[in-house]
Amino acid sequence: MAVIGIFFLPPIRISLFLVVSHSIQRKILYRKLPQRSLLSRKINTHVPTQCFSRNFNKTSALKLFGVMLSSNPPPSVLCFNTFLARLKNLRDYSFVFRIYRISLGAGLFSPDVHTYGILIDSCCRLGRFDLGFGVLGDSIKRGWNPDIVSLSCLIDGLCKNGKIRDAMMLFERMPVLGCMPDAVTYSVLISCYCKIDQIKLGFRVLGEMLKRGHSPNTIVYNTLIKGLCSINRVDDAAVLVEMMYNKLGCSPDVVTCTTLIKGLCSINRVDEAVILVEKMHSKLRCSPNVITYNTLIKGLCSINRVDEAAILVEKMFNNKLGCSPDVVTYNTLIKGMCSIDKVEEARVLVEKMYNKLGCSPDVVTYNTLIKGLRSINRIDEAGVLITMRYNKFYRPSKA
């Protein structure tokens, strides 16, 4: 059975775990003693305090675990869950299982539904769905019905790893397991379907979600809008954005609008994208950010309207649009200039990035300008830039 694999993970090569058996023996002895240390009496306060300290790391976690092993009485299950959750945040997910294995073997605590949720999430992050389902089976055998968080984690992990059929089977079995899908579960499935271009199934899940009385949030609609744009159904995406504003009681945000702007630009409907940016200010009360403007600048450059893109960048620099250009902004404009043989203007802009604009060129800037110079046979200048690029980004630093 998959859950057995949890108890056969490689041992931790740290000295504390060489004396774990002695710690367990001490724990049994301490429980027979009439006196109890101050720390033992306050262990349920001490553990959370240490877990949320700034210096919490693997080493301090092992020291704290040693205290927990010797505590009389042992820490509460809430304490252990706090400890395991904090360990999970260190992103060493197999370490979480090793600590769990030793704690369980020492009889320190009985896991509850929240413990299993932490373990299942760790399994999903490791990509070990066999262990995840093993943990799920173990929790059911111990009399715990899985909670919505655990099942949503498994469904999300399966979806992200392309196991769509398994995710759907688990989704359909949720009522049998005594757990009804919530808004998060539906959102995970919708996102999954959109990523594999199964937009129709995504909308079917949305319909089921509404039927069950769950209100989709902006993130759900943004996912569907992105999915529609990815298959060039931009008009349908635009209708959905309009419905969000007028009927669905869920206001579009900057991500919504930027996604639609990108979709419009991808099919050369840049004028509509420009109007939407203006509408964000006037009607939607949603200020464009640098990503919005970068998307629009890229769209303008893609249809050779580089001069308009340059004006937009100038306005950004002069702080007339509420956000400043970044290196992506300038790289996009430089690429646009080079594409219409305005390589000299692109070269001047790169020099300004150094001296006036407060935005250092990156390797993409150099690559774009080198390609532009080569396209008009200015090979010597391109060679100089290649040397500069090497010295700046690739040359090993002196020790």
Image: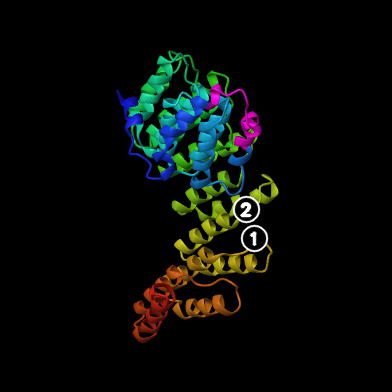
Segment colored magenta: 30-48
Q: Which of labels 1 and 2 is toward the front?
A: 1
- Which amino acid does the dot numbered 2 rest on? Pro
Residue 356 image offset from top left, x and y in percent? 61, 78
The earlier-in-sequence mark between 1 and 2 is 2
Out of 80 and 383, give the one closest to the viewer: 80
Q: Quarter of the image holding residue 274?
A: bottom right
What residue is drawn where x is 59% and y is 58%? 290
Mark 2 Cα shell of 10 Å, populated few (<14), some (14-19), many (≥20): many
The amino acid on which the numbered mark 1 sits, given as a three-letter code, is: Cys
- Answer few, some or many: residues within 10 Å of disc 1's Cα (few below 14, many 20 plus, some between 14 and 19): some
Q: Are marks 1 and 2 in contact (CB under 8 Å)?
A: yes
Mark 2, residue position: 288
Name the residue beneath numbered marker 1.
Answer: 323
| Prevailing secondary structure of the magenta residues | helix
Image height check: is 379 above or below 296?
below
**Local secondary structure at mark 1:** loop
Looking at the image, which is closer to me, 122 or 72?
72
